[in-house]
């Protein structure tokens, strides 16, 4: 599994939103400038995040985006799934005649990797990521 630019930029932009919102709406242009991401690209990302209920938007001069719920209630997994879809290391096979080895690998190796990845991203909240960033920790150390 490889997280796409949409997932990486989206998570980065959401962390920025939490850091700079102070309970108020944040404009995409401000996030785009701070994160060096195209505003047009962020508009596409935030449209998805809005549709999935992660952020809310307000139009107008004082408009922008704000989290739809507290950062402690939003997981990294929720954000990544909204932007990436399923977080599996392999794509599902439509092959009805899967051979025994492939079937075994699916239930052991690939299934266990998927389980651990999902466990990590579902236990890690947006608030924890932001708090670690504020502490000056550049790298979160989670072992899979």
Image (spheres, rainbow, N blue to C red):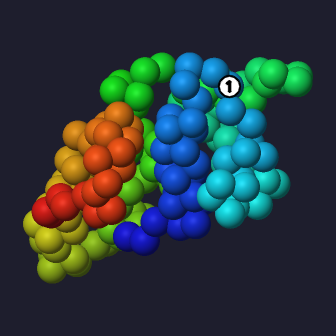
Residue positioned 58% across, 30% down in the render? 21
Q: Position of residue 93 (x, y in %)?
A: 39, 67
Q: Give the crowd class for mark 1: few <14, some 14-19, many >=20 residues within 10 Å.
A: many
Residue positioned 73% across, 45% down in the render? 30
Q: Position of residue 82 (x, y in %)?
A: 52, 43
Quarter of the picture containing the N terminus is bottom left
Q: Would you say 44 lies left or right of 48 here?
A: right
Residue positioned 81% across, 54% down in the render? 40
Q: Position of residue 67 (x, y in %)?
A: 55, 26
Q: Which residue is mark 1?
A: 25
How many numbered discs, if any? 1
Residue closer to the observer: 43 or 131? 131
Q: As displayed, is residue 106 above or below residue 42?
A: below
Q: Position of residue 106 (x, y in %)?
A: 21, 67
Residue closer to the observer: 19 or 55? 19
Residue positioned 22% across, 77% down in the render? 102
Q: Would you say 55 lies left or right of 32 here?
A: left
Q: Would you say 88 lies left or right of 5 here?
A: left
Question: Picture quarter containing residue 95?
Answer: bottom left
The answer, for residue 119, to whether it is visible in the render is yes
The answer, for residue 107, to whether it is visible in the render is no
Residue closer to the observer: 137 or 12? 137
Q: Say which element carries label 1.
A: loop
Quarter of the picture containing the C terminus is bottom left
């Amino acid at each position: 599994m490889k997280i796409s630019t949409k997932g990486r930029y989206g998570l980065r932009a959401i962390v920025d939103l939490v850091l700079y919102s102070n309970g108020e709406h944040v404009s995409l242009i401000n996030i785009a400038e701070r994160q060096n991401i195209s505003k047009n690209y962020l508009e596409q990302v935030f449209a998805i995040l809005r549709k999935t209920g992660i952020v809310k938007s307000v139009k107008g001069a004082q408009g922008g985006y704000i989290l739809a719920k507290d950062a402690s209630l939003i997981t990294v997994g929720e954000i990544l799934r909204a932007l990436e879809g399923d977080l599996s290391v392999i794509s599902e096979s439509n092959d009805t005649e899967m051979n025994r080895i492939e079937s075994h690998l699916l239930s052991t190796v690939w299934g266990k990797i998927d389980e651990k990845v999902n466990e990590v991203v579902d236990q890690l909240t947006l608030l924890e990521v932001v708090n670690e960033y504020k502490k000056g920790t550049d790298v979160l150390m989670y072992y899979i």
